[in-house]
């Protein structure tokens, strides 16, 4: 199993790149979200990969972030979604948009992705809604502290609540309420404890 590649970016197109790793050229298919964050050709590049092997196909799919790769694998667990359709979803919507749409049952947004009709979008919501909190947590962990007003305590407290089974939006509301009415020097442990008693 190939889990990542470090090499020189030789070719770069919106859905496909070629990496020279120790003299071997690897063709890697990437979503637009990762493509936009890759450097220019002839620069060094690090890609997280998913090695897709079937009787009639052996392909590498590459991602810049852990959250993208995790969601890619999660999407492929839905019947009717293969690697190309999962890649299309990540090229059309952000990780945050997809996880939010699944958690919120937004079939219309999911169905707007090319190749995903209403039936597959509904299946995504039904099959992934209970699993999505883990993906949301990963996406949240990858977020910068700026997303939480620069407050590390808020981010860490929300992550702790998500790991305990709370939805991301609910966790953020609880932590915000605790911080609004609490002392400015509360520790993450104190914030989580107070949030759990609300």
Image (spheres, helix red, strand yellow):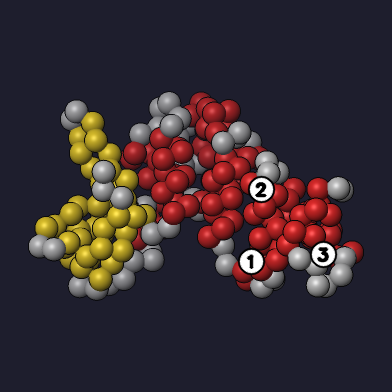
Q: Is residue 101 left or right of residue 33?
A: right
Q: Is residue 108 visible?
A: no
Residue 129, image quadrant: top right
Secondary structure at badge 3 equals helix
Helix, strand or loop at mark 2: helix
Q: Which residue is mark 1?
A: 147
Question: Badge 3 local density, few (<14 within 10 Å), some, or many (20+)?
Answer: some
Report helix, strand or loop for mark 1: helix
Per the image, the residue denoted by label 3 is 179
> What residue sits 54% from the left and 52% below the top?
138
Toward which corner of the image does residue 127 lie, by quadrant? Answer: top right
Of residues 148 and 83, the one nearer the viewer is 148
- Ranked by sequence position, the earlier of labels 1 and 3 is 1
Q: In the displayed structure, does residue 177 sit left or right of residue 156?
A: right
Alpha-carbon distance for marks 1 and 3?
Answer: 16 Å
Residue located 66% across and 73% down the image = 150
Residue 18: image tag: none
Residue at 41% x, 35% y is 76
Q: Is residue 144 visible?
A: yes
Q: Which residue is mark 2?
A: 162
Q: CA distance from mark 2 to mark 1?
A: 16 Å
Q: Quarter of the image containing the N terminus?
A: top left
How many numbered badges does the structure rendering display?
3
Circle 3/circle 2 CB separation < 8 Å: no
């Amino acid at each position: 199993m190939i889990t990542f590649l470090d090499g020189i970016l030789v070719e770069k197109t919106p859905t496909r790149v070629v990496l020279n790793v120790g003299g071997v050229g690897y063709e890697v298919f990437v979503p637009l979200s990762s493509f936009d964050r890759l450097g220019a050709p002839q620069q060094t590049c690090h890609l997280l990969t998913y090695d897709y092997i079937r009787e009639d196909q052996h392909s590498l799919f590459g991602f810049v972030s852990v959250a993208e790769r995790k969601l890619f694998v999660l999407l492929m667990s839905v019947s009717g979604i293969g690697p190309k359709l999962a890649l299309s979803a990540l090229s059309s919507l952000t990780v945050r948009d997809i996880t939010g749409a699944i958690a919120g049952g937004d079939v219309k947004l999911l169905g707007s992705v090319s190749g995903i009709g209403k039936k597959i979008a509904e299946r995504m919501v039904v099959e992934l809604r209970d699993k999505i909190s883990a993906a949301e947590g990963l996406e949240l962990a990858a977020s910068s502290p700026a997303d939480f007003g620069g407050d590390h305590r808020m981010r860490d407290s929300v992550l702790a609540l998500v790991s305990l089974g709370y939805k991301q939006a609910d966790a953020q509301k609880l932590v915000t309420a605790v911080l609004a009415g609490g002392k400015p020097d509360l520790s993450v442990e104190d914030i989580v404890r107070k949030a759990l008693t609300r």
